[in-house]
Image (cartoon, grey):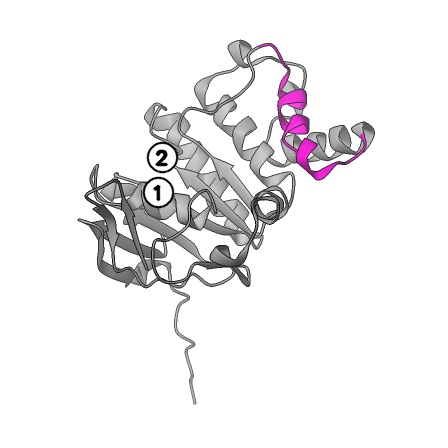
Amino acid sequence: MTRSYGAPPVQALRGVTLQIDTGEFVAIVGPSGSGKSTLLNILGSLDRPTSGEAIIDGEDLNMLSDDRLAALRAYRLGFVFQQFHLADGHTALRNVADGLLYQGRPSSERFATAEEALVAVGLAHRLKNKPHQLSGGERQRVAIARAIASSPTLLLADEPTGNLDSASGEGIVDLLFQLNSAGATVVVITHDNALADRLPRRIRVKDGLIIDDSTNPATLPAPMEITS
């Protein structure tokens, strides 16, 4: 697929073929301007390709109406952003519950689901705290809880450790590994090669092209030992 903008057109993606299977944990890495953010926008149904197909959980984005795209994002996709995007005046519980508004759930169900998600990310003791009362790592955990509350098919994390100190960032990476081990498909967009090199699959993007797609041998299951 390709994606171009403006006139004369500038190609952000110049012919990308990519398949991510259920249950994978993938890093998409590249410098600023490489096309990784454009790729994230298409993976997250926030944008459509100029040519070619983008199929998310069996749905061709080019064939969906705006309402169907909104439903895809609400029910099947979870987003975690570098800037957290939390409402300052609301508690952690309210921030996560409000992320379920587009699903039209009753208030009691939204808040019960939000509490379960916050407990799952280790914030049972922070339900009533507002963002200014939380550390950077805790705010990112709230953002992750909001993303997983709807049980999405695909979790997309855009520079999830970019605004955190090393200790907090390590905690977020551990949490993403836990979510993946529990069955979530996770895609991390990052410019951090050290982080990318820790994940099971690394896709390197440059000038709108995938220049490398490799598996990290250190994350593969150990071979079965057969003795006689």
Crowding at label 2, few (<14), some or many (≥20) Cα neighbours within 10 Å?
some
User: What residue sits 67% from the left and 35% below the top?
Assistant: 102
Question: Residue 198, can we see it?
Answer: no
User: What residue sits 17% from the left and 49% below the top?
Assistant: 207
User: What residue sits 47% from the left and 63% below the top?
Assistant: 21
Which residue does the numbered mark 2 point to in the structure image? 159
Crowding at label 1, few (<14), some or many (≥20) Cα neighbours within 10 Å?
many
User: What residue sits 40% from the left and 64% below the top?
Assistant: 19
Label 1 sits on a secondary structure element that is strand
Position of residue 180 in the picture relative to residue 26 (left or right): right
- Count all numbered tags in the image, as a single digit: 2
Position of residue 78 in the picture relative to residue 42 (left or right): right
The amino acid type of the residue labelled 1 equals: Ile
The answer to whether marks 2 and 1 mark residues whose Cβ atoms lie closer than 8 Å is yes
- First in sequence: mark 2 vs mark 1: 2
Between 81 and 209, the residue placed more toward the observer is 209
The amino acid type of the residue labelled 2 equals: Glu
- Can you say whether 71 is above or below 94 in the image? below
Question: Residue 137, can we see it?
Answer: yes
Cα distance in 3D space between marks 2 and 1:
6 Å
- Can you say whether 25 is above or below 142 in the image? below
- Can you say whether 199 is above or below 33 in the image? below
Quadrant containing the N terminus is bottom left
| Part of the protein shown in magenta | 89-106
Label 2 sits on a secondary structure element that is loop
Residue at the farthest bottom position: 228
- In x, y percent, where is residue 7? 22, 41
Q: Which mark is residue 114?
A: none
- In x, y percent, where is residue 52? 36, 62
Q: Quadrant of residue 189?
A: top left
Which residue does the numbered mark 1 point to in the structure image? 189
